[in-house]
Image (cartoon, rainbow, N blue to C red):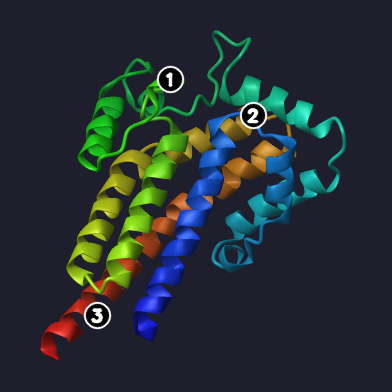
Amino acid sequence: MNEETKTLVEANASRAGIYRVLSSLFFKELTDEQLDHIKELDFSAFEGMDPLFAEGCGDIAAYLAKKNTATRSLLACDYSGAILGAGYHDERRATPFESVFTSSRGLLMQEARDDVYKTMLRAHLEVNDSLHIPEDHLSFIFEYLAVMTDRCNEALEADNLTEALENLEHQQQFHREHLLNWIDVYCDTLADCAETGFYVGVSKMTRSFVHLDEELLQDLIDAVAQEAGEEDLS
C-alpha cells in the first residue's frame, strides 16, 4: 500500500470512527461506561476543520468534566424527553427518524424508511428485527455509512481502486439523500428541545460533521479518481 492510499485509509478510518460515535449518541440512553469513553475521545483532528464542531465538542467536554453520580440519570432524562419525546404529545421533539422530518405529515415508516431499507438490503445489511426500530433511524444511517467506509478501506487495501471509487460515490449519494436533506432542521429541533449542554453539544457536533463529510467525501472521490487515473497511465 503506497503512501497516498495509506492516507486515504486513515482518513476513512477517522470518518468511520466519528460516525460510530454519533450512532451511539442517538441509539439509546448512554451508560456510565459510554460516558467515560466519550470523555476520553480525542476529536482534535476534526475540531480544527470547523468552529461549530469544536464548539460542540467543548459543550460535551464541559458537561462531562463535571460528571458525578447523577450525570447518567440527568442525561437519560434529557434523551427521553428530547429524543424519544416521552411525555410530549403536541410539541415537536427530536425523534431521530428521517421519515418524521421529511414526510408531509411527519409520520414514521414513510418513503424515506422504505428507501433506506432497500439500500441496506442491497448492501446485505439488516437491522435486528428484535429492536422494532425503523431503518431510517439516525443511528442506523450513521452506522450504515461507517460500514460502507470500512468496505471502502478493504477495497483500497486490496488495491481495487474502481471498487473503492464506486463505494465512495454511493456514500456521497446516500449522504445527500438521507442526511443532508434533514440534518439541519433535526439539529435545530434537538438544540431547542435539549435541557443539557451535553445534547446541545451533540446537536452542534452532528450538524458540523455531516456537513464536513460532504466535503471529505468529495475530496476522497477526487483523490481516488486521480490515483486510479495515474495507475491506468503507468
Of the 4 image quadrants, the one containing the N terminus is bottom left
Residue carrying label 2: 29
- Which one is in front, 72 or 83? 72
Residue 138 screen position, x and y as percent? 45, 35
Q: How busy is the neighbourhood of tag 1: few (under 14 within 10 Å), some, or many (20 plus)? A: few
Mark 1 element type: helix
Look at the picture and state if 138 lies above or below 105. Answer: below
- The residue positioned 87% from the left and 38% from the top of the image is 68
Query: What residue appears at the point 55 percent right and 34 percent down from the top-left corner?
Result: 26
Q: Quadrant of the C terminus?
A: bottom left
Q: Residues within 10 Å of mark 3 (few under 14, many from 20)?
A: some
The residue wearing badge 3 is 227
Query: Relative to 162, is 10 on the left or the right?
Result: right
- Place of residue 51 in the rendered image (x, y in percent of width and height, measured from the top left): 60, 60
Q: CA distance from mark 3 to mark 2?
A: 43 Å
Choose the circle earlier in sequence order: 2 or 1: 2
Disc number lying in front (2 or 1): 1
> 194 above or below 205?
above
The label on residue 130 is 1
**Between residues 172 and 123, which one lies in front from this camera angle?**
123
Disc 2 and disc 1: Cα gap in Å?
A: 18 Å
Is residue 4 among the parts visible in the rendering?
yes
Give the x, y percent position of residue 191: 61, 35
Name the amino acid, label 2. Glu
What residue is rendered at 29% in x and 42% in y? 177
